[in-house]
Structure formats: structure tokens, C-alpha cells
């Protein structure tokens, strides 16, 4: 019995110890400010249940929930709403896609009507000879191709041009046939060639290297740069040439010429040489031009053909060569960078826009001519364009221009250089000598536009002949 009591007392003691330990773990720290608490609270530790009941009794029932339960934030509820989650995910996806598109998209050059040059390891522009299919170029790490690869890439885009024109021999009119070369520059049938190839043409026929033949129309010509653009109407896309960058050329670079020398039977002839000079200033048919010089063989019939680099890109349009029994290896081509804006303007407008024109034709009066004919040194006005800028300014045939914009001028090229520094609508001042009297005139420059053949014939018929001494033009070598 005593054992049982002892055991019971020991059990109660253990329970008290456990309760005491539990109460110690659950007690809260007593707040520093105990004002307002009852005396019972001052004499013992607080427990969670006691705190809850005390606070609940001290706060009105309508406010108790705000004190007892923390307020849940509204944005957390918003994130749990399915509609908001769907909208947010859509916005994030769109922003991500737009970011990738903006990083990878390369917009085309604004305003260009010509295909853009590809990198050295992309598709070639010229394709199958007669099928017009685009073929792949061989990938070369250096970017250069072998000579056969350049020919395979570019030759399908070089065409033969046969021109039929009328020539008046005595009383009877005769048909004259001539030939040249051209380069397909767009798959829809635009072809660039030289102006002198198609000048005066009554009919133009284009033949591809694969034997396809088309009748071509002349879109526009530019005598100043000796360029012309033709158009054919193919049934399917044509292989076209890749235009390069002539500003990257160096003397000593290899150059390949493809064209149709002498006659159509020799179409597609390849000649190989080097770039002999760049930015060579040449006077061709009275026009001052900047040319690429090459020793790649260029012969009559090559005019309008392609001068290529080792990537198979067109860097020049073959135009002329120096001839003579003691001349060899002097060929010239129009740089493609100078040809591009002319080609684009012709395709878009039919002519080269934005060029100023004075509207007169002049001849240089040298010191020798001045002494012999008793007229001042300058530029003799030999012709006037009807209703043109010069006529409106009061300039007459027989006047001698001695100053332009305050600068003394002795050649037509000097006047043209000053003119080309302005744009249509600008005004320039000129001093002229008219029968010994000095006059100053103001010319409002107009835009140069091509004349039709009918307008040219009418102008020639209506143009009065200058009153000059009979031996005047002998000084010009006429």
C-alpha cells in the first residue's frame, strides 16, 4: 500500500514537472509597458490563450477580426485569378517573341529597287541556264570562288543584245544590225546595258546563254553615264546577277569579264585579268567619266557585259577599250556603285531625276581661236534649248560665257562642274560677252529630262544657225 502511494506521488510529481516545463515553453515575454493590465497579469506569465481572450474582450466585435486575423493583400488574390494569369502569360510571351524578332530582323534598304547583295556564303543570284532555277553556290570560307565557279554563278545572268536600227544612206533607208551585252539585274526581267548599245534602236532582241529569246523594250537611257535599262517579259523568274561593291576594289585584284565579243556566236565568252587602276578619269565621246581600268580582254560586243570579282559579284559594266596596233590590255568599265543610283532612278522614273540643266550647248574658245576670230576666251554658246533655262534668262546664240558664279570659265566642263554643285530650282549668275558688251544674267536651273526622238528632230529643224565666220569651226578640228 505504501508502495502504491509512493508510486502515485511520484507520478503526480512528474506530471507537475512536465506541466511546468510546457508552461515555460509557451510563455510570452512580458511587454515593457504594462499599463492597463490587471493585477493578475502583473503577478504571472502570459499564455497564448490568455492573450487571445484579453485582446478579444478589449476590442469591439466589429473590429476584432482586423486585429486577430492579418489582412490578406489584394495583389495576392489577383495573381490567383485565372483570367489575370492568362492575360499576363500572353503579354510575357508577346514581349519575348518581339524581342527575338527585333534582335534578328534586318530591314531592307529603303527605296532600293535592286536586289541586295548577299554574304559570301549565301545563295547565288544566277541560276540554271534556261530553267531559271536558283542554284546554290559552293561555300568557301575565304569568300572567294574558283574561276569556273564564278563563271557558273554569273554567266546565266549575262545576255546577248541584238539591235536593229534604221540608217539613211543617201535617199534609201537601210536596216543596220549591231550587237552588245547586258546583265539581268532582277528576276522579273530588268536588264542593264550601255546607252551606246541601244542608241537609235528600232527593235531590241535579248538572248540568254541558254538560248531563250525575248523582245525587249527600252525603259530609259542616260547618255551622261552611258547606261540604259531594258525590260523583257519572261514566263518564269530569270537568273539575275549579284551586284557587288566597287569601293572595295584594290589595284591587283583579279577581274573577270563575261560578254559577247564581236558577234552573237561568241556569246558567253570569259576573259580573265586584273584591276589595273581605279577611279580613272576618262573622256569618252566628249563625256568625262570615272572608270575602272582592267587588262581583262574587252572587245566590241563586250559593251554592257559584266566585270566580276572573285565572289562572282558584278563590280563594273564593261564600256570601252583603247584601240590601236600598239595598244593592248586597256579596258574600262563603269563602277557598279556609280551605276546603281542611275539604274534605280531609270527603273522608278524612266530617267535620272534631280539633275540640273542650263539648256545650252557650248564650245571652248581657246587663246588661239580668240586671237584668230577676235572673240574673248570663254565658252561660245552654239545652241539653245527652246523654252529652256538659258533662253528664259536671255542668253543668245553667239554669246561667250566668261564667268559663272564669279569664277572665270574657259571650258564647258568647268561650267558643268559648277552646275552639278547645285540642284534644280537653284539660281546661278553668269557674265557673258555679247558683241563686245558685258552682261550679267541669272539662270534658274531646271531638271534635266530626256527628249523623245520627235522632240530632238523638231529642235534640230527649228534651231537657227549661228552667224560665224566660215573658217571658225576649223579651229575645232571639224
Image (cartoon, grey):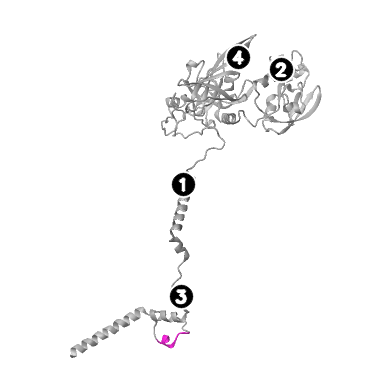
Q: What number is the disc on residue 19?
A: none
Residue that mark 3 sits on: 67
Residue at the image point whose x is 77% and y is 29% from the top: 441
Q: Which of marks 4 and 1 is in front?
A: 4
Q: Measure the alpha-carbon separation of dots 4 and 3.
A: 108 Å
Residue at the image point whose x is 63% and y is 12% from the top: 168
Q: Measure the alpha-carbon separation of dots 4 and 1.
A: 61 Å
Mark 2 or mark 3: which comes first in sequence?
3
Q: Which of marks 2 and 1 is in front?
A: 2
Mark 2 or mark 4: which comes first in sequence?
4
Say if residue 328 shows up in the picture. Answer: no
Q: Position of residue 164 (x, y in %)?
A: 56, 16
Judged from the image, the secondary structure of the residue bearing numbered disc 3 is helix
Judged from the image, the secondary structure of the residue bearing numbered disc 1 is helix
Q: Measure the alpha-carbon separation of dots 1 and 3.
A: 50 Å
Q: Is residue 273 found inside the magenta-colored segment of the image?
A: no
Residue that mark 4 sits on: 166
Q: Is residue 286 left or right of residue 466?
A: left
Residue that mark 1 sits on: 100
Name the chief secondary structure element in magenta: helix
Front in this rendered view, residue 101 or 141: 101
Q: Position of residue 135 (x, y in %)?
A: 42, 29
Residue range (magenta): 36-43
Find residue 377 and report its image quarter.
Answer: top right
CB atoms of marks 2 and 1 within 8 Å: no
Mark 4 or mark 1: which comes first in sequence?
1
Q: In this view, does 368 lie to the left or right of 246?
A: right
Judged from the image, the secondary structure of the residue bearing numbered disc 4 is strand
Amino acid at each position: 500500500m505504501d508502495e502504491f502511494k509512493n508510486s502515485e506521488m511520484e507520478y503526480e510529481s512528474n506530471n507537475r514537472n512536465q506541466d511546468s516545463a510546457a508552461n515555460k515553453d509557451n510563455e510570452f515575454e512580458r511587454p515593457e509597458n504594462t499599463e492597463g493590465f490587471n493585477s493578475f497579469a502583473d503577478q504571472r506569465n502570459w499564455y497564448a490563450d490568455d492573450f487571445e481572450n484579453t485582446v478579444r474582450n478589449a476590442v469591439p466585435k466589429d473590429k476584432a477580426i482586423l486585429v486577430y486575423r492579418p489582412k490578406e493583400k489584394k495583389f495576392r488574390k489577383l495573381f490567383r485569378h485565372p483570367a489575370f494569369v492568362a492575360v499576363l502569360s500572353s503579354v510575357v510571351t508577346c514581349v519575348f517573341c518581339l524581342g527575338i524578332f527585333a534582335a534578328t530582323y534586318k530591314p531592307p534598304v529603303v527605296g532600293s529597287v535592286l536586289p541586295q547583295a548577299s554574304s559570301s556564303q549565301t545563295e547565288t543570284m544566277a541560276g540554271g541556264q534556261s530553267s531559271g532555277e536558283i542554284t546554290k553556290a559552293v561555300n568557301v570560307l575565304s569568300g572567294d570562288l574558283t574561276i569556273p565557279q564564278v563563271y557558273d554563278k554569273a554567266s546565266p545572268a549575262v545576255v546577248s543584245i541584238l539591235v536593229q536600227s534604221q540608217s539613211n544612206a543617201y535617199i534609201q533607208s537601210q536596216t543596220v544590225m549591231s550587237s552588245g551585252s547586258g546583265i539581268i539585274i532582277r528576276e522579273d526581267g530588268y536588264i542593264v546595258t550601255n546607252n551606246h548599245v541601244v542608241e537609235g534602236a528600232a527593235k531590241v532582241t535579248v538572248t540568254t546563254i541558254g538560248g531563250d529569246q525575248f523582245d525587249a523594250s527600252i525603259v530609259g537611257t542616260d547618255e551622261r553615264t552611258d547606261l540604259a535599262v531594258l525590260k523583257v517579259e519572261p514566263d518564269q523568274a530569270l537568273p539575275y546577277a549579284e551586284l557587288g561593291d566597287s569601293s572595295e576594289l584594290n589595284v591587283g585584284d583579279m577581274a573577270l569579264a563575261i560578254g559577247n565579243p564581236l558577234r552573237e556566236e561568241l556569246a558567253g565568252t570569259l576573259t580573265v585579268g586584273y584591276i589595273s587602276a581605279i577611279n580613272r578619269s576618262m573622256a569618252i565621246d566628249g563625256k568625262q567619266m570615272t572608270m575602272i581600268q582592267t587588262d581583262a580582254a574587252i572587245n566590241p560586243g563586250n559593251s554592257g557585259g559584266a566585270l566580276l570579282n572573285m565572289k562572282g559579284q558584278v563590280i563594273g559594266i564593261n564600256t570601252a577599250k583603247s584601240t590601236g596596233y600598239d595598244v593592248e590590255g586597256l579596258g574600262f568599265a563603269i563602277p557598279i556603285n556609280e551605276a546603281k543610283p542611275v539604274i534605280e532612278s531609270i527603273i522608278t522614273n524612266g530617267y535620272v531625276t534631280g539633275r540640273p540643266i542650263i539648256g545650252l550647248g557650248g564650245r571652248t574658245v581657246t587663246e588661239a581661236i580668240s586671237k584668230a576670230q577676235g572673240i574673248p576666251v570663254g565658252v561660245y554658246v552654239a545652241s539653245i534649248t527652246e523654252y529652256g533655262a538659258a533662253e528664259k534668262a536671255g542668253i543668245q546664240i553667239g554669246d561667250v560665257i566668261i564667268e559663272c558664279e564669279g569664277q572665270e570659265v574657259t571650258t564647258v566642263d568647268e561650267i558643268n562642274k559648277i552646275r552639278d554643285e547645285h540642284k534644280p530650282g537653284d539660281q546661278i549668275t553668269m557674265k557673258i560677252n555679247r558683241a563686245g558688251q558685258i552682261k550679267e544674267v541669272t539662270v534658274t536651273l531646271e531638271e534635266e529630262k530626256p527628249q523623245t526622238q520627235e522632240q530632238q528632230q523638231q529642235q534640230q529643224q527649228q534651231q537657227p544657225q549661228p552667224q560665224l565666220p566660215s573658217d571658225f569651226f576649223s579651229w575645232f578640228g571639224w
